[in-house]
Amino acid sequence: MSVLITNIGELTTNGQERGAATDPAAALDGFAAIADAALVIEQGRVAWTGPASRAPAADEIVDAEGRAVLPGFVDSHAHLVFAGERGAEFAARMAGQPYRAGGIRSTVAATRQATDGQLRANLRRLAAEMLAQGITTFECKSGYGLTVGDEERSVAIAAEVTPEVTYLGAHVVPPEFDGGPAGYIDLVCGSMLDACAPHARWVDVFCEQGAFSRDEAAAVLAAGIAAGLEARVHANQLTAGPGVQLAVEVGAASADHCSNLTDADVEALATSATVATLLPGVEFSTRHPYPDARRLLDAGATVALATDCNPGSCFTSSMPLCIALAVREMHMTTQEAVWAGTAGGARALRRTDVGHLGIGARADLVMIEGPSHAYLAYRPGVPLVAAVWRAGERVA
Ligand SMILES: [Zn+2]
């Protein structure tokens, strides 16, 4: 059973990998598109791309009527296992109160009280919300349980909906360890890790003033890596701290936030395989200054965009919003921003099967109301997603 999608106004392919994963410079040249294009899906994979005039026959034909088609968005940073909501905190922040990492604790209290069924239902609702908006691959973190049992059920429930599960026991120190955070580090690196590692691919830590210090974060990452997990780091969000340097030192796939960087941080990212994942929805929702994407791109760093969907600092699941913010507020080109929300996210998750539409890629596609990828930034806030395919199957 083959499906031909034809009369595509612009098909963003991002090319094929061709070994580019080992060449950081090549990653920046990744945006590629074909005008007046067609694409064939076979067995859940991209089987052919090219000019519509040369498209082969297929069992089924979909007429895109000039709309653009892109790779499904890859959201490499999301916190979707939680209970409760913080709309009032958001309103207070907009009325002038500052954002602090400790606000996470209110979600921790609600999450601990929730049943598995409530956590699962909330997660599935958010996952469906993402899919309807074109996110066909997403990462999902724990980090609102902060007990062995609550972290274990968080990663187990996350693993029901995505293979990209991240153990974030080191999100904040929970209130019961206020007198001695060292005891909490022991737990995160010990029995909590033992319980969570079987359900997770990644280990993450919030390295920030008010969360975890460099030495604490290093201990968490080392323990996770020793348990077979791969590293990613919440780094340099609120202050130019040690997070980015630590991420590069341990060979993390990604340093996320990167909102406050020194020259040495930019250099470290530009000369390593660690992706700089920018989360502009956070700055939008906290009225903080946006990360300097141009400085990173011009230095040669690989930049990804992700939503950071979470109930506190940024409750959006919209990659088109993040792309629009990246273009309008962070001076990325439309091509750079779309690449960062697709292939960049794939790099940040060390995935080569998604984020592009080269031959053999998973057939994850987004069709938008508009003739080119630029419409994602050109028409901000408009629901442009016309159709979504995941692994060749029409899902929205
Ligand atoms: Zn986060």
Image (cartoon, rainbow, N blue to C red):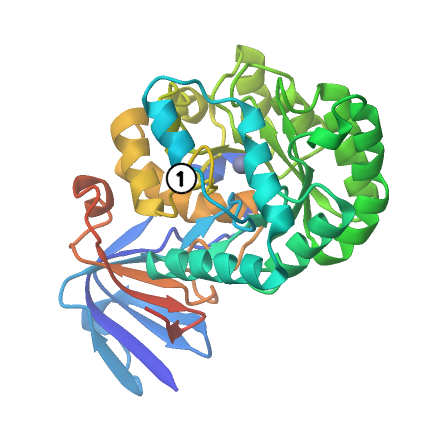
Question: Residue 326, how many percent across, how many down?
Answer: 32, 32
Q: Which residue is drawn at 67% across and 59% down?
A: 156
Task: Classify mark 1: residues with Cα within 10 Å, few (<14), some (14-19) or many (20+).
Answer: some
Q: Is residue 79 visible?
A: yes
Report the front residue among 213 and 51: 213
Question: Which part of the image, by quadrant, shows the N terminus?
Answer: bottom left
Q: Which residue lies furthest to the left in this view?
A: 65
Q: Can residue 72 be seen in this view?
A: no
**Which residue is tagged 1?**
29
Q: Residue furthest top?
A: 263
Q: Residue at x 44, y 56 (%)?
A: 126
Horizontally, residue 143 falls left or right of residue 394, namely right
On screen, residue 80 above or below 45: above
Q: Which residue is drawn at 52% across and 16% down?
A: 261
Horizontally, residue 378 falls left or right of residue 159, namely left
On screen, residue 136 above or below 45: above
Question: Residue 290, how many percent across, how many down?
Answer: 38, 22
Which quadrant of the structure image shows residue 220? top right
Question: Which part of the image, by quadrant, shows the C terminus?
Answer: bottom left
Horizontally, residue 104 falls left or right of residue 57, namely right
